[in-house]
Image (cartoon, rainbow, N blue to C red):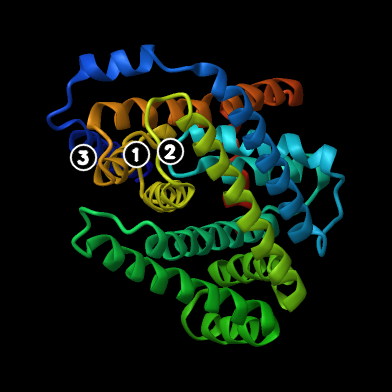
Amino acid sequence: MKRIYFWIGVAISAVFLWWAMRGLDLAAVWQDMQSANYWWLLPGVAVYFVAVWARTWRWDYMLRPLKHIPLRNLFPVVVIGYMGNNIYPFRAGEVLRSYVLRRREAVPMGASLATVIVERVFDGLVMLVFVFVALPFTPIPGDDGSIRAIVITASVIFFVAMVVFFALAAMPERFYALAEWLGDKFLPERVKRPLLDFLQRFLTGLESLRSFQNVLMIFFTSVVIWLLETVKYWFVMHAFSFEVSFFALMLMNGIVNLATTLPSAPGYVGTFDGPGIAVLTLYGIEKGLATAYTLVLHAALWLPITLLGGYYMLKEGLGWADFGHAVEVAEQEASA
């Protein structure tokens, strides 16, 4: 099954790459990349790591009902997780960082994975907010309404997911009792008990959503994180000979990161690049130049945190086999 999922991701990446490369003059792309002023990447990378530190603070805030962990101890765990997302498909890094957290701080994986899922939902909502905010200020000349339709559909999905999480967080005892009743009716004891134990740990991980103040803080931090990442888009843009508004880059950031929620090959190959190139070309940027910018931006987002994550991984004494071991531990925790 895992192999099937992997090849599904590769196929989706291939489709996006084909879409991005249709009619592309590779010589022009290479020329644009050679003429770029790469000094602009330095402030972009610096701002990106400020955003990673903000992600660490957000995760600490969500983990506090479970355990308060100093940011200096949590930061390497977050970086290892994002490195895992970059080199393994299906965001396997999220499982890896929960595994490292369990190993270092004895926080149950079921509870920490719940906070990670909530993070992703908030990130998706902020991406949608970026698109809705940016569109009135920078209407896309070539858009026939399809982008707005996609955004509205995604908004409904993320809104439903958020309502479900809020309901689970607000009434954990009732949902646990309902799950227990359903388990008594339809599941054998050897299956029911592990699932109920995992559900209990998962509900514990949603405790940060039980306070309206906590929800506002998580949402506000998520907005700051993605604004900082858009600032990186802005810095990298200055390395190339074109300019669009900050709102246009917010829109690109929102659409690109919504697309990367799809299954893909490791490193979001294709699902990042295709939509990014498409948005810029709709704003009138020549396709070769848009491609050069998007590829350099993708590399600037991928490489620094992957290298730092590899350093922390070696320092932690972890090997590549620990990716698989992390999944095994999560499965064992759900069934033991």
Would you say residue 50 is visible in this rendering? yes
Q: Nearer the viewer, residue 328 or 243?
A: 243
**Cα distance between the residues tagged 2 and 1:** 7 Å
**Cα distance between the residues tagged 2 and 3:** 16 Å
Q: Which residue is mark 1?
A: 6
Asked if residue 23 is positioned above or below residue 189 in the image, the reply reads above
Asked if residue 103 is positioned above or below residue 286 in the image, the reply reads below
Using residue 267 as the reference point, say whether residue 319 is left or right of it.
Answer: right
The disc placed on residue 35 is none
- Residue 237 in percent (x, y) is at 45, 32
* Nearer to us: label 2 or label 3: 3
Asked if residue 146 is positioned above or below residue 28 in the image, the reply reads below
Q: Amino acid at mark 1?
A: Phe
Would you say residue 204 is visible in this rendering? no
Q: Amino acid at mark 3?
A: Val
Q: Nearer the viewer, residue 307 or 114?
A: 307
Q: Which residue is mark 3?
A: 15
Rendered residue at 36%/33% (across/down): 269
Pointer 2 and pointer 1: residues touching (CB < 8 Å)?
yes
Asked if residue 34 is positioned above or below residue 286 in the image, the reply reads above
- Residue 129 in percent (x, y) is at 49, 64
Q: Amino acid at mark 2?
A: Pro
Q: Secondary structure at mark 3?
A: helix
First of labels 3, 1 by sequence position = 1
Using residue 208 as the reference point, say whether residue 285 is left or right of it.
Answer: left
Q: Which residue is mark 2?
A: 89
Q: Secondary structure at mark 1?
A: helix
First of labels 2, 3 by sequence position = 3
Pointer 2 and pointer 3: residues touching (CB < 8 Å)?
no
* Nearer to us: label 3 or label 1: 3
Rendered residue at 48%/29% (across/down): 238
